[in-house]
């Protein structure tokens, strides 16, 4: 290892997987490849979960987190504070996901030590960290403490603007966009092999090579616009009767989505397969990617789909426009516009050559600007710079 020792703190982690958790998991793996001694500190959401595991070669430390509302958060914060105090001397940096309770406790416990605390803002708009601080109990108090962190990372320009508007010190803000691994080139053989692998794992998918397949990956949440995708799929099936849609993930809207799918009789055309720890097979098997969200920062799911060379059809919102130029490396459609979405889907499926050009341009864009290796390097350099600065002051 390089001598750099870093703890990544995220209250939710595998097997509870969402966008923020995947960012931390992939960043941890890439930092390890760059010779950083990295660990993940998270919550133990169920009593039968082991306190310590190794996930993809990364040690995971789980702290008590009773499921009782309120008390669970307090117990977790106390455990996190104790852990950081006990292990502070063996850490060169602590990187915390979300400007919430974990961030508050990390800053409070370590601000007078030589260990730098770096916070990472997650999401923007109504579901982002800045909005949460405005509206949550003790949110403004937590914000005041977060202002004292050594650095705050913004993964998108929109989130950077929100942080500035919330009073964060510009000199402590750092724009580091999400990074994704760049997979091998997309080929017909990889598509076929991925479909066979998925069908072997779940025979009900029955993914033969001729069936069009669209994929969404992310949280199952009302803000993700998934009802719009389901409604649009009814019309897609009029042109492509065998087409299938996978809405991959977990979240509070799952029951509602299942009910809507069942009420439309689309159980054999739209699937909710749950969480996938690795979505590479899904993306290799797919013909297009959907992201019908109402709000996004810089979507990790979209970056992964673009890196895989998939044509992406996404809502015309600010976060998506940072990545997608409609007609060049993807397609934009108005939020909650079922007709526009189904027309774009049909056009992509009807014109595979044009769709392939969109996917190739998307892959080139992500390879050049948003690789996981580059993102990890920028994080590592920030950690090292802050470590040296704090040691010099000490």
Image (spheres, grey):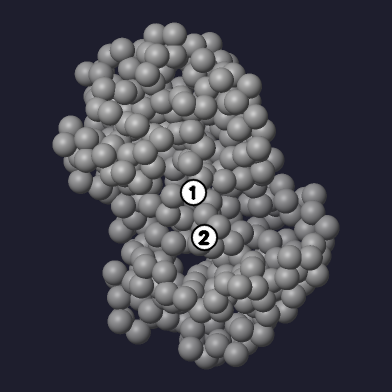
**Residue under the image location 58 percent in, 52 percent down:** 122
- Residue 123 position, x and y percent, is 59, 47
Q: Give the image quarter of residue 255.
A: top right
In the rendering, at what x and y percent does residue 22 appear?
46, 55
At horizontal 41% and vertical 35% (from top left) the residue drawn is: 204
| Residue 49 visible in the picture | yes
Query: Label 1 to label 2, Cα distance in Å?
Result: 8 Å
Q: Which mark is residue 15?
A: 2
Q: Residue furthest front?
A: 203
Furthest residue in direction top, as rendered: 238
Q: Which mark is residue 53?
A: none
Task: Name the residue carrying label 1.
Answer: 275
> Is residue 133 positioned above or below 212 on the image?
below
In the foreground, 115 or 252:
252
Going by the image, does 108 lie left or right of 152?
right
- Residue 161 at x, y = what percent? 60, 45
* Mark 1 crowd level (few <14, some 14–19, many ≥20, 10 Å Cα): many
Residue 175 visible from this viewpoint: no
Callout 1 touching callout 2 (CB < 8 Å): yes
User: In this image, 79 relative to 310: left or right?
Assistant: right
Position of 32 relative to 258 (above/below): below
Q: Where 74 sits versus 388, above or below?
A: above
Image quarter of the N terminus? bottom left
Nearer the N terminus, badge 1 or badge 2? 2
* Residue occupying the point 28% across, 37% down: 195
- Quarter of the image that includes the C terminus: bottom right
Tell me which residue sits at (36%, 72%) in the image. Answer: 57
Residue 373: percent from the left, percent from the top? 30, 58
Could you classify mark 2 by the number of other residues whose Cα lies within 10 Å: few (under 14), some (14-19), or many (20 or more)?
A: few
Q: In front: 235, or 93?
A: 235
Q: Which image quarter: residue 100?
A: bottom right
């Amino acid at each position: 290892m390089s001598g750099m020792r870093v703890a990544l703190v995220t209250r939710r982690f595998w097997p509870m997987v969402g966008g923020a958790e995947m960012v931390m998991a992939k960043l941890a793996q890439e930092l390890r490849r760059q010779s950083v001694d990295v660990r993940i500190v998270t919550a133990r959401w169920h009593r039968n979960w082991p306190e310590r595991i190794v996930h993809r070669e990364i040690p995971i430390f789980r702290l008590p987190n009773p499921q009782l509302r309120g008390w669970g958060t307090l117990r977790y914060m106390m455990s996190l504070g104790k852990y950081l105090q006990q292990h502070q001397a063996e850490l060169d940096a602590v990187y915390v996901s979300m400007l919430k309770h974990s961030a508050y406790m990390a800053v409070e416990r370590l601000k007078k030590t030589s260990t730098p605390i770096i916070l990472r803002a997650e999401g923007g708009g109504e579901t982002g960290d800045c909005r949460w601080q405005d509206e949550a109990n003790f949110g403004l108090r937590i914000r005041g403490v977060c202002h004292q962190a050594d650095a705050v990372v913004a993964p998108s320009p929109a989130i950077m603007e929100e942080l500035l508007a919330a009073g964060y010190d510009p000199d402590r803000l750092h724009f580091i966009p999400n990074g994704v691994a760049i997979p091998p080139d997309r080929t017909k053989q990889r598509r076929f092999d991925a479909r066979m692998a998925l069908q072997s794992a779940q025979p009900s998918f029955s993914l033969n090579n001729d069936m069009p397949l669209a994929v969404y990956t992310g949280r199952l949440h009302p803000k993700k616009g998934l009802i719009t995708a389901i409604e649009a799929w009814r019309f897609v099936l009029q042109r492509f009767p065998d087409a299938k849609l996978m809405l991959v993930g977990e979240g509070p809207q799952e029951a509602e989505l299942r009910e809507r799918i069942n009420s439309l009789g689309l159980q054999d055309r739209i699937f909710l397969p749950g969480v996938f720890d690795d979505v590479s097979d899904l993306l290799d098997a797919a013909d297009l990617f959907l992201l019908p969200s109402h709000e996004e920062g810089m979507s990790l799911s979209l970056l992964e789909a673009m890196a895989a060379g998939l044509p992406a059809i996404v809502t015309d919102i600010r976060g998506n426009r940072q990545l997608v130029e409609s007609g060049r490396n993807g397609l934009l459609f108005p939020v909650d516009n079922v007709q526009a979405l189904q027309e774009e889907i049909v056009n992509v499926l009807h014109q595979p050559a044009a769709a392939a050009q969109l996917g190739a341009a998307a892959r080139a864009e992500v390879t050049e600007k948003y690789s996981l290796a580059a993102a990890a390097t920028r994080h590592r350099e920030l950690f090292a710079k802050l470590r040296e600065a704090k040691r010099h002051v000490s």
